[in-house]
Image: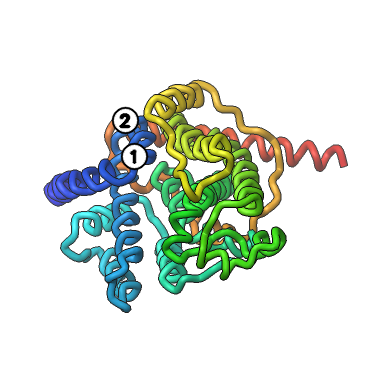
Amino acid sequence: MHDRAITTEFGFQIDLQSCENLMRDGSKSFFSASRILPSKIRDSAIALYAFCRLLDDMVDDPNAPDNVIEQIEYRLDRIYAQNPVDIPADRALAIVVERFLIPRDILEALVEGFRWDRSGRQYHTIDDLCTYGARVASTVGAMMTLIMGVRDRAVLERACELGLAMQLTNIARDVGEDARNQRLYLPREWLEAENIDPDLWLQNPIFNDGISRVTQRLIEYADQLYERSSDGIAGLPRNCRSAIASASLVYSEISRQIERQGMDSISKRAIVSKQKKIFLILKSLRTTIYSAKSKQVFSKIPAIQFLVDAVEPERDYAHYSGSVEDRLIWVVGLMERVERRKADSYHSLAKQQAA
């Protein structure tokens, strides 16, 4: 058993190098934030993101075969059978899903979002758009939370909201690029309220005051989600908080750049400079030292609840291998959860007595 574990870990590290090369070239914001994650969590996060990136590239490829979604589902079958196809990202993800007990329902939801992309699906309302965002982005937030060893429902909800916020930021940034590829993610209802015919606009995607106001609404909605999601950072292991905080800060800064460009994301693409990213990452480090969890009660966002429901809450930290570092993380996490449960019980009892 010990020899098998060593062999598995050696193979994982080899495959991980391929995953890391892929992410270094293609996802600079993620790669910057991931550098401050603990090594084992960072490795698994890179494996997850590399797999998702490969799937995204498959779906976006104009020359992809008609059965590309079926090909992806076959790869998932093999991953969950612990017999992945001979691709580094698949082999690495097979280890990750077993180690971190990632429910297949979450990855299936991601694939469903890709299926919607392939079909050119559009979204009438912001709620419809959130339903899409839950699949292509909140899924990743949920899986990252599991990789960090947290299965608390409230923290999972905040993580899903952060993923959703990031996806809305992507949409606001890529309005022009998407339109030139005959894709529309802005809510049709919002466009029609600005007297913009979505189908006619797609034929000639130009920037105007109406598009500016729709983009602003999307950014404001995303900002609310960033604010909500920040409450979940205190529920993460201390050595993971700054990485997630920095990812949130860097992505929300894209919105600020869009605003500085006069809301024009059709003729321009909002980019966060390397210097600004470094500043935001340094700013995020304070969450490692202090990150208070508020007592605010948040309303539910229906679009993400199925992802939270997919997670079995009591299967905590089954993935850690037994090193001193891992055990310390496990103990700290356990103590934090016990203290939170004690506090919740105390407040509940106090409310009952007051009543």
Residue type at the position of mark 2 = Glu
Q: Position of residue 132 (x, y in %)?
A: 53, 62
User: Along the horizontal axis of the image, is 295 left or right of 25?
Assistant: right
Quadrant housing residue 192: bottom right
Please give the residue where the numbered disc 2 appears in the rendered image.
325
Write down the quadrant of residue 73 in the picture: bottom left
**Residue at the disc numbered 1:** 28
Residue at position x 37%, y 48% in the image: 318
Q: Residue at x 32, y 78 (%)?
A: 66
> From where the camera sits, is residue 330 visible?
yes
Tell me the element at label 1.
Answer: helix
Residue 273 lies left or right of residue 189; in this view the side is left
Q: Quadrant of residue 256?
A: top right
Q: Residues within 10 Å of mark 1 (few under 14, many from 20)?
A: few
Q: Is residue 124 above or below residue 323?
A: below
x and y, in percent, of residue 222 in the image: 59, 46
Q: Amino acid at mark 1?
A: Lys
Q: Depth check: 192 or 220 in front?
A: 192
The numbered disc on residue 129 is none
How packed is label 2: few (under 14 Cα within 10 Å), some, or many (20 or more)? few
Marks 1 and 2: which is nearer the front?
A: 1
